[in-house]
Image: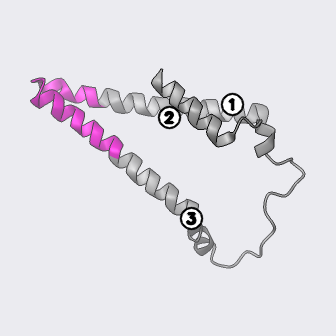
Amino acid sequence: MGLAIFSTTLLSTTFRFKRQEYFIPPRDAPTQPTEIISRNKYKQIMSHKVVHLLGAFIFVNVGVRFSIGGWIVTFIIDVRKGGSSAGYISSGFFGGWYNKVGLVEYLTNSIATRHYSW
């Protein structure tokens, strides 16, 4: 319940109760001015701050995920005196994680194609 209240408060202060149409430009309007594309596309890509932020996020996300997966097995073996089948818990953790990722991807694609047919 606390997470729901926190999320609602954060979203309402961020978007200030404005409707979605306020943030999405009309289809006819160009999103960015046309630029001359240079020969080195990777230099253009790496010059954006967002690319570095996404890379840092993915690096931290994967590190935390695998640290938690390894810690679960260590905790079960050392503290809970688990046996040789303690690795199944980590497998269940990663299986649930990737099933969630697949479900979110499917829902995102189905909602986006239904509401925004690019």
Q: Which residue is mark 1?
A: 110
Q: Is residue 60 above or below residue 12?
A: below
Q: Which residue is mark 2?
A: 101
| Residue 38 against residue 63 in the figure, above or below | below
Residue type highlighted by circle 3: Lys
**Dots 1, 2 in contact, CB < 8 A:** no
Disc with the residue nearer the chain's start (1 vs 2): 2
Residue 94: x and y in percent read 36, 33
Q: CA distance from mark 1 to mark 3?
A: 29 Å
Mark drawn on residue 49: 3
Are there few (<14), some (14-19), or many (20+) residues within 10 Å of tag 2? few
Residue under the image location 50 percent in, 62 percent down: 52
Amino acid type at image mark 2: Val
Label 3 to label 2: alpha-carbon separation: 25 Å
Tell me if residue 51 can be seen: yes
State the SS at label 3.
Answer: helix
